[in-house]
Amino acid sequence: MTAALRSQLSWSTTGIEMNPLLKFNFLRPFIHMYNTWRMNRYLVPRLKERYNLMKGKDANPGKSVIDLALKAYQAENPSKDTIPAAFQEVAIAQIKLFIFAGHDTTSSSTIFTFDLLAKHPDVLARVRAEHDAVLGPDPSEAGPRLTETPQLLNQLPYTVAAIKEALRIYPVVAALRVGQPGFSLVAENGQRFPTENCVVLGDHYGVHHNPSVWPDVEKYIPERWLVEEGDPLYPIKNAWRPFEKGPRNCIGMELAMTEIKIILALTIRSFDIMDAYKEFDKVTKNPKGMVVDGRRTYMVRGAGGGHPADGYPCKATLRY
């Protein structure tokens, strides 16, 4: 299932590719059909099975998006014994979206957070101290404590700040919108830019690295997410956009933030994780390596979102 989804993403286009061979590959529609068949072969039977299980009087639906959607549909259509094709199509599309969001973009964001923490020992020490205070001094007890009291994740404000700052420096997705007739983007000086027949790209990386928007723009400063309004570091409204804004923001935002917090809570005190680019560049006979904005850990476009350069070669050392 996941392999088919990743293949689908790697064969998809956004409309902004410069290489015409990427746009007009005659194999693409056939590969898309094959991957769709592979994914649906796995997902459709499980969706129907879940639907049938939830019809019973003693059914105990979970709180997942699909369970809630199925429950709402059954409440409105109690006499329906099968899922209509239109509802099934929408439900399957949403399942694929959640699998993608939880598998690809979250993993890249987690890696970038690990890397920035490793390169800023003072921030890393403060994150670990916060975990000691909230989750207990024994890292092996973090999992059982969170299982028993998941609300403890809400008591890690500095960890959240460290993650948000990592997402500012490395926003792994952008926003694509199809322009509409009669709809224009309006600049501060009043100049209008019609969007009809255009693909509108929200360049989150550009906004997040704009020195007129962010003080000390290239520095990793989690404290900017903890200061009071009026402080020079206080973020400008709507400038932070890794999950976009408004009614079409990422529906998986809370899930992604929760996953990254859990991963850090279970690992950051037990392991030291450092990049191994020097060793990688030596093996690949690339002695200098490429640097972007002063970082060897720069972001490259991958299937579905931004990924760490060269797959982020790294080494993990057990601390205890």
Image: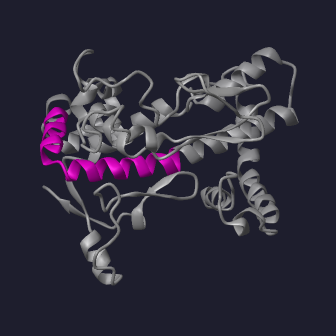
Residue 283 appears in the picture as rendered: yes
Residue that appears at 58% across and 45% down: 99
Q: Is 313 or 238 nearer to us in this picture?
A: 238
Residue 104 part of the magenta-drawn span: yes
Place of residue 251 in the rendered image (x, y in percent of width and height, measured from the top left): 56, 30
Position of residue 280 relative to residue 248, above or below, is below
Q: Residue at x 64, y 24 (%)?
A: 68
Please tell me in which quadrant of the rendered image residue 133 appears. top left
Magenta highlight on residue 77: no
Chief secondary structure of the magenta portion: helix
The picture places residue 150, in percent across and down from the top left corner, at 35, 27
Residue range of the region highlighted in magenta in the rendering? 102-131
Residue 156 visible in this rendered orientation of the protein? no
At horizontal 52% and vertical 23% (from top left) the residue drawn is: 188
Judging depth in this view, the residue of 18 and 115 nearest the camera is 18
| Residue 215 higher or lower than 271, as above or below | above
Residue 273 in picture, x, y percent from top left = 24, 58
